[in-house]
Image: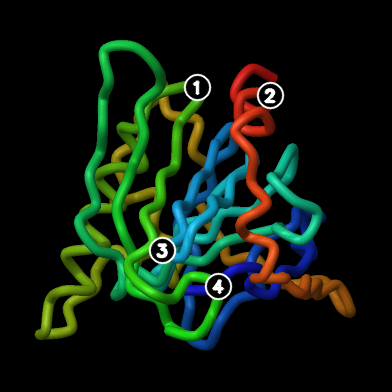
Amino acid sequence: MAVNPTLAHDGASGTLFPLPQAAETFLLKRDGIDFECVLPRGGKLWGRGRFFLSSKRIVFVSVERSCRADFKSFEIPLPQLLSPKFNQPIFGANYLSGTVQPSDPAGPCGGGLPAWSLTFNSGGCGTFLPLFYQLMAEIQDRAGNAPIAQAAAEGRLGQVAFVDPSDPSVLYLSQPTAAPDSTQETPFRSEDTQGWREDDRQGYEHS
């Protein structure tokens, strides 16, 4: 888990996305997302943008608004993701929530299990949810079976994934590559996480 993992510009679309890791395969991306993370030592991080689902992680990238200038993205490694739950409140948008084991106990997310959520502001989740839960099952499969990740790596994801017309998630039918010299790294000042204010959050929710 990391605050501000390295990003890059997609060589084909120019979209800012997570710089691919070794042997990583991207499955989909989803716009119109509100992200929030409650930090164990106090304070919150939030932003509005999109997230990416890969064979290894979920990465939220702030493209519209964020709680602070040095918060650009948040990485949730799937093997460290705990208690994922899809929530469907009577009032308000559906959201996925859970906790995550911190990679660095001394880092900004250390001291406990950060609680996070991804809120889907528009459209359904019939494409994303089956892929997500099947991918989580593959990660927990000690036999190493990974048909979804393999299909995405081979460009066959469109043949095996259910596509819900009401879900605006975009499947990766070919893998993105970073444009030359386009990587972005943003230092995060963990000592400022207490600076989140409730009035800032209310303005964010109603914008």
For the residues labelled 1 and 3, say whether their Cβ atoms are less than 8 Å apart.
Answer: no
For the residues marked 1 and 3, what is the alpha-carbon distance in whole angstroms?
30 Å
Q: Earlier in the sequence, mark 1 or mark 3?
A: 3
**Residue pictured at 46% horizontal, 65% vertical:** 41
Q: Nearer the viewer, residue 188 or 157?
A: 188
For the residues marked 4 and 2, what is the alpha-carbon distance in whole angstroms?
24 Å
Q: Circle 4 sits on which residue? A: 108
Secondary-structure class at tag 1 = loop
Q: Position of residue 105 (x, y in %)?
A: 43, 84
Is residue 150 among the parts visible in the rendering?
no
Q: Earlier in the sequence, mark 4 or mark 2?
A: 4
**Residue pictured at 89% horizontal, 79% vertical:** 181
For the residues marked 4 and 3, what is the alpha-carbon distance in whole angstroms?
9 Å
For the residues marked 2 and 1, what is the alpha-carbon distance in whole angstroms?
19 Å
Q: Earlier in the sequence, mark 2 or mark 1?
A: 1
Q: Is residue 81 left or right of residue 1?
A: left
Secondary-structure class at tag 2 = helix
For the residues labelled 2 and 3, say whether their Cβ atoms are less than 8 Å apart.
Answer: no
Q: Position of residue 67 (x, y in %)?
A: 69, 45
Secondary-structure class at tag 3 = loop
Q: Circle 2 sits on which residue? A: 203
Q: Can you tell which quarter of the image residue 108 is in?
A: bottom right
Amino acid type shown at disc 4:
Pro
